[in-house]
Amino acid sequence: MRRICAYIISVVLFSGYTPVHGQDTDAPQDSVTIPLKVSFGMDVSGPVIYFTNKNILNTEAYFLYDLDHKKALHASGGYSNYKYSQYNYSYRNKGIFFKAGVDFNILKPEISGGKYWGGVGLLYGLSRFTWQVDSFSHKNYWGKHIVSMPEQSDWGHYLEVSPGFRAELLKNLSIGWSISLRKLLFTSAPKDLKPAYIPGYGSTGNAISFGMNYFITFNFAFKKIRVGIKPETPPEPEEEGGSGMGTGIIRGIM
Amino acid sequence: MRKQFVKIFSALLIIIPAFIYSCTPGSCFEETEAKVKASMYQSLSEKIVAPDSVSLFGLERDSAIYKKTSNVTSILFPLDPASGTCTFLIKINGVSDTVTFSYSSHVHFISKECGYTYYFSIEQPVTTNNIIDKIVLTKKTITTLNEENMRIYY
């Protein structure tokens, strides 16, 4: 169910994308007006996943402040409540997390036009959480042994790289998605008892944690700037007497 | 060219997470029980030589860990996490000895798929000497890794 929702939202976002070319005119432009915005967004995939799986609740909201047409300050926070059980153990974890960093827009201004964002965010994350093992069963030659571990509080620090895409759906309303690649830097939990899950980070099993979010964002422009458009370099003229194969390759690249 | 690049970039950013999300949940492929791994050394040659037969029982237990097993160059001793000592009856080439371990245990998290297990820290084992000449402790921390913890010279 979770994967079906992910595919449907991806198809809707991708099919709605159309590049923007600034003002509607056929004449070549040397600059474009870009609104700088303050944005407030919230993750919608977490509540949707919780609707299908009551063991995982992830809520996240974020704030963006455009520094210029390329960079924006990013601050986000959220709450997570995670339960996992299988045949030999039952684990619970809940806590809050905060992330701060910078989002970089790699779309050219004449393409983004202040309506589209395609780029990558670099964030530092901090998580404060409690976890406990309600029961853990160990069976061997000597018999079955069941114990539990009481609630413990710990911290987690991590780095996140999150490429993504946002598109303006209506005035002041955007939707978008991002994938997250996270690297755990430090956890205060003992070496032998690394938490199975860290809020904001995800499962700790692999060296890198993957995640995906879908956002709905409210944008408010506070300033407009003019950004120059770099003129395209004209194609080099064909060399007379050159091989046909070489010329064909250059044409394909241009 | 720019339109094509942006469309390809956007498509990749959709396809890659779709692949990641389509992966099935992991299974546990790791060893989940920590056992004492003892290599069998012949005292005369001081080389690893498998006894003709090995049997291993926990003291006052009916079931055998090894029952007249041949070609065994490494014996695995399971420890009881609910106790601080374990005694085994080991029969090498038909001659019996007892081996007693004293140890402390602590819980260790393997992975989300495998869950938790116990690791141990053992002291020098105590043995009778009917066929066992000596036991040399090489690594006192008992983990799920496949590494030698002690050598039994017989």
Image (cartoon, coloured by chain):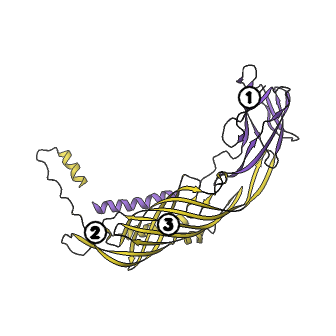
Chain ID for yellow: A
Choose the circle earlier in sequence order: 3 or 2. Answer: 2
Q: Is residue B60 above or below residue A167?
A: above
Residue carrying label 2: A110
Q: Position of residue B151 (x, y in %)?
A: 73, 30
Amino acid type of the residue that numbered disc 2 sits on in the rendered structure: Glu
Q: CA distance from mark 1 to mark 2?
A: 75 Å
Give the secondary structure at mark 3.
strand
Question: Can you say which quadrant of the picture contains the C terminus of chain A?
Answer: bottom left
Amino acid type of the residue that numbered disc 3 sits on in the rendered structure: Asn
Q: Is residue A176 left or right of residue A49?
A: left
Does residue A58 appear anywhere in the picture?
A: no
Q: Position of residue B91 (x, y in %)?
A: 83, 30
Amino acid type of the residue that numbered disc 1 sits on in the rendered structure: Met
Q: Position of residue A209 (x, y in %)?
A: 53, 57
Chain ID for purple: B
Q: Nearer the viewer, residue B128 or A125?
A: A125
Residue carrying label 1: B40
Question: Can you say which quadrant of the picture contains the N terminus of chain A?
Answer: bottom right
Q: Chain of mark 2?
A: A
